[in-house]
Image (tube, grey):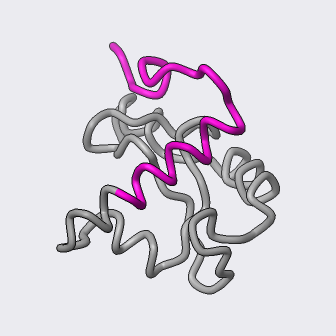
């Protein structure tokens, strides 16, 4: 795995921090089934595997946010995701969420 891939992956320690911070619930619907840590800025765009760029999503919300065909709903979920992280890390810039060489 390359340096960028390593930086964009959530380490076990970071995952533990996110699970604790998010009370082991989806930050969008508060569900507890099929949880995974999701990137706000995707790995494909260089999104880092840091707590400031990740949150817990249930399988349904994660799929709707990543692959949803209803663009209005997708936009709403992405906005809610961003607002959640902004409440926890006020003023944290997107520039620090992205991998740079």
Expressed as whole percent of the image width and height from the top left, the position of residue 17 reads 77, 48
Q: Residue at x 36, y 74 (%)?
A: 63
Image quadrant where residue 30 sits: bottom right
- Magenta part mainly helix, strand or loop? helix
Horizontal side of 93 relative to 90 (left or right) equals left
Q: Residue at x 44, y 24 (%)?
A: 94
Considering the image in quadrants, where does the C terminus appear? top left
Q: Residue at x 25, y 72 (%)?
A: 68
Front residue of 84 and 49: 84
Q: Residue at x 44, y 46 (%)?
A: 40
Expressed as whole percent of the image width and height from the top left, the position of residue 79 reads 43, 49
Considering the image in quadrants, where does the N terminus appear? top left
Horizontal side of 13 relative to 8 (left or right) equals right
Q: Which residues are magenta?
A: 76-101
Task: In the rendered view, tell whether residue 67 sits above or below residue 49.
Answer: below
Expressed as whole percent of the image width and height from the top left, the position of residue 3 reads 39, 29
Residue 96 within the segment the image draws in magenta: yes
Horizontal side of 48 relative to 22 (left or right) equals left
Image quadrant where residue 8 sits: top left
Task: In the rendered view, tell whether residue 25 sits above or below residue 14.
Answer: below
Horizontal side of 60 relative to 15 (left or right) equals left
Expressed as whole percent of the image width and height from the top left, the position of residue 24 reads 75, 69
Image quadrant where residue 57 sits: bottom right
Front residue of 78 and 59: 78
Task: In the rendered view, tell whether residue 24 sits above or below residue 17.
Answer: below
């Amino acid at each position: 795995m390359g340096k960028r891939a390593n930086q964009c992956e959530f380490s076990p320690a970071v995952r533990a921090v996110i699970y604790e911070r998010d009370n082991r619930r989806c930050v969008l619907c508060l569900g507890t089934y099929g949880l995974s840590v999701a990137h706000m800025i995707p790995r494909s765009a260089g999104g880092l595997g840091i707590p400031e760029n990740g949150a817990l999503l249930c399988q349904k919300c994660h799929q709707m946010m990543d692959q949803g065909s209803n663009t209005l709903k997708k936009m709403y979920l992405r906005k809610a995701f961003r607002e959640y992280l902004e409440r926890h890390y006020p003023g944290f810039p997107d520039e620090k969420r992205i991998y740079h060489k």
